[in-house]
Image (spheres, rainbow, N blue to C red):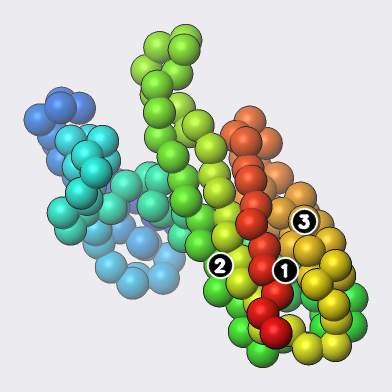
């Protein structure tokens, strides 16, 4: 399997500095980052490690869920997945990820709601990004639309 690369160029201190994250492998762009924007309610045009991790987790989870649903006999019309990644204080000092909340809505024929929920839970446990984040509480809300 391939290795993917991203890089960050940073100048200055944590509070006064800023950087740019480059999506090197895909060449899809360079995005501004800064700690003040990371810690603020309004990102104001910058991204953060949490947002990038949320993007990775929602994409990975979607792929894993599509595999779980197909194995359960479902035909996937659409999946809408979001990942809310929260940064908070670490009791040991500094910061840490305090939780990730996955929300998925699916349009899937050929299965019932119970099967969908079982597949959604299995995807949460088996997605490679979820496996990498075992130190963070990951919660899930899953709904099969009629």
Pick the residue in front: 135 or 76: 76
Q: Which residue is mark 1?
A: 65
**In contact (CB < 8 Å): disc 1 and disc 3:** no
Q: Earlier in the sequence, mark 1 or mark 2?
A: 1
Q: Earlier in the sequence, mark 1 or mark 3?
A: 1
- SS class of the residue under badge 2? strand
Residue 61 falls in image quadrant: bottom right
**In contact (CB < 8 Å): disc 3 and disc 2:** no
Viewport quadrant of the N terminus: bottom right
- SS class of the residue under badge 3? helix
- Mark number displayed over residue 81: 2
Image spot of residue 145 (x, y percent): 67, 79
Image spot of residue 71 (x, y percent): 88, 76
Is residue 119 something one can see in this rendering?
no
Extreme residue in the top direction: 92
Residue positioned 67% across, 36% down in the render: 134
**In contact (CB < 8 Å): disc 1 and disc 2:** yes
């Amino acid at each position: 399997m391939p290795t993917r690369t991203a890089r960050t160029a940073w100048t200055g201190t944590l509070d006064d500095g800023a950087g740019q994250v480059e999506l090197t492998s895909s060449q899809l762009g360079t995005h501004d980052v800064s700690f003040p924007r990371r810690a603020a309610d309004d990102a104001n045009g910058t991204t953060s490690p949490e947002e990038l991790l949320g993007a990775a987790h929602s994409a990975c989870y979607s792929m894993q869920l599509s595999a779980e649903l197909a194995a359960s006999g479902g035909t996937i019309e659409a999946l809408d997945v979001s990942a809310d990644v929260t940064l908070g204080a670490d009791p040991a000092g500094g910061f840490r990820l305090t939780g990730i909340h996955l929300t998925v809505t699916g349009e899937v024929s050929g299965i019932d709601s119970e099967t969908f929920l079982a597949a959604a839970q299995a995807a949460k446990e088996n997605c490679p990004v979820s496996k990498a984040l075992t130190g963070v509480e990951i919660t899930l809300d899953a709904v099969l639309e009629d």
